[in-house]
Amino acid sequence: MDHHINPFEMAQRQFDEVADQLGLDAGVRAILRWPLREYAFRIPVRMDDGSLKVFQGFRVQHNDARGPAKGGIRWASYETMDTVRALATWMTWKCAVADIPLGGGKGGVVVDPATLSVTEKERICRGWVDQMWKNIGPRMDVPAPDVGSNAQMMGWMMDEYSKLVGQYTPGVITGKPAGGGGSLGRTEATGFGVIYTTREAFKHLGIDPKGKLAAVHGFGNVAQYATIGFTELLGGLVVCVACWDRNDKCSYTFTKMDGVDPHFLKSITDQYGTIDKEKAKAAGYLIEDGQAWLSKDVDVLIPAAIEGVLTGETAGLISPRVKIIAEGANGPTTPEADAVIKQRGIFDIPDFLANAGGVTCSYFEGVQNDMNFYWSKDEVLAKLDQKMTNAFWAVTDMSTKRNVYMRNAAYMVAIDRVVQAMKLRGWVW
């Protein structure tokens, strides 16, 4: 990510543009431009060597008019209140555009998880809950995993909350391990959701996806399953994936023009999304510069890692062949890049539509926790496909009806649903 980009300012600029088009009341804008509640706190932790370290934690609840706040907890050394604010804001729109009864929240811990032992991670997880347990809950705010966190960490957090409230409460956290209150299909959900919306975009454009080419940015969970889905569900070829190398502190693009093998790459990728260069080279992969994925002669670009990778400058590198951009990451495209994409006529599936599969499956997990009855993986993915397909066409219909860019159309659908909920609850009139 370009750390000169302030993601919250970007989120507000995107909102303001659509608020102008909708003619939103000034009071309504004032509610939606900023989060309703923000928490910043310190987490003291005894490290394995006996020393005491204090970590910065965050939780932001942007809007809960449609239901409990919902959103992941990111563990990253570059985390700031503004990144968390932006992501909480986008979660409000994501839940609304997917038409699930949840609001937007996000959390964070300022730390590189790769520097921690398993026991240190567990202590930070429990410490985060110790600071926030009075302000989260199944009917209030439901965290989940995100960058740098995983299912096991969510299991520890759910356990800590259950101890503090004195009863087993699986619905306080989603993204838990299957068998520990988690939902089958959650691992694939975000990446497959990106592919379900890409499939519908191909239909909208009248293009057969079979044999089409894609380039993917990132190789964490979302990118892995987007790569698998593009290959196995659509019959396309992913010709390269780009990822951050945490050892070299730079990114590389792994290219195979006859199609990467996502399962092989997954088998040589560590838990932080770094692919083993030597094993990839030995298997015939070309190792290129980290930005090489952008200029590949492909039909689809899938930015599925971090914010701000498509800027006014980098968007100029995109091949003339590209017809679809499917935003697997949160906030990968700046407003300056949007201007280039619009001018080029590329069909963009905005982040809070394309990657809504994760939060939709998290919603399903909460429903299953409430019922204490769990669906099969096929049932979960079928329900997910239906939700994502409906969301895609609601946004596409709005785009066609109002003759607006897809991102603006997604905002229009989402903002209208949130404003209607606020009106029904008497917050605004």
Image (spheres, helix red, strand yellow):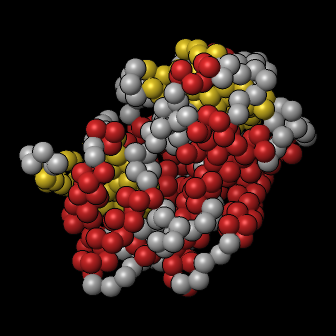
Seen in the picture, residue 232 relative to 32 is either above or below; the reply is above
Q: Is residue 126 left or right of residue 205?
A: left
For the image shown, how many numbered marks are present on the structure?
Answer: 0
x and y percent of residue 205 in the render? 86, 39
Seen in the picture, residue 266 relative to 390 is either above or below; the reply is above
Q: Residue at x 58, y 55 (%)?
A: 187
Q: Residue at x 71, y 22 (%)?
A: 256
Q: Is residue 117 left or right of residue 427?
A: left
Q: Is residue 290 left or right of residue 394?
A: left
Q: Would you say residue 397 is visible in this rendering?
A: yes
Q: Is residue 200 left or right of residue 132?
A: right
Q: Quadrant of the N terminus?
A: top left
Please tell me which residue lies in front, 384 or 278.
Answer: 278
x and y percent of residue 395 in the render? 71, 52
Q: Would you say residue 346 is visible in this rendering?
A: no
x and y percent of residue 288 in the render? 58, 14
Q: Quadrant of residue 230?
A: top right
Seen in the picture, residue 397 relative to 161 is either above or below; the reply is above
Please tell me which residue lies in front, 340 or 266.
Answer: 266
Q: Residue at x 43, y 76 (%)?
A: 170
x and y percent of residue 270 in the render? 47, 38
Q: Residue at x 36, y 74 (%)?
A: 137
Outermost residue on the left side: it is: 51
Please tell me which residue lies in front, 237 or 307.
Answer: 237
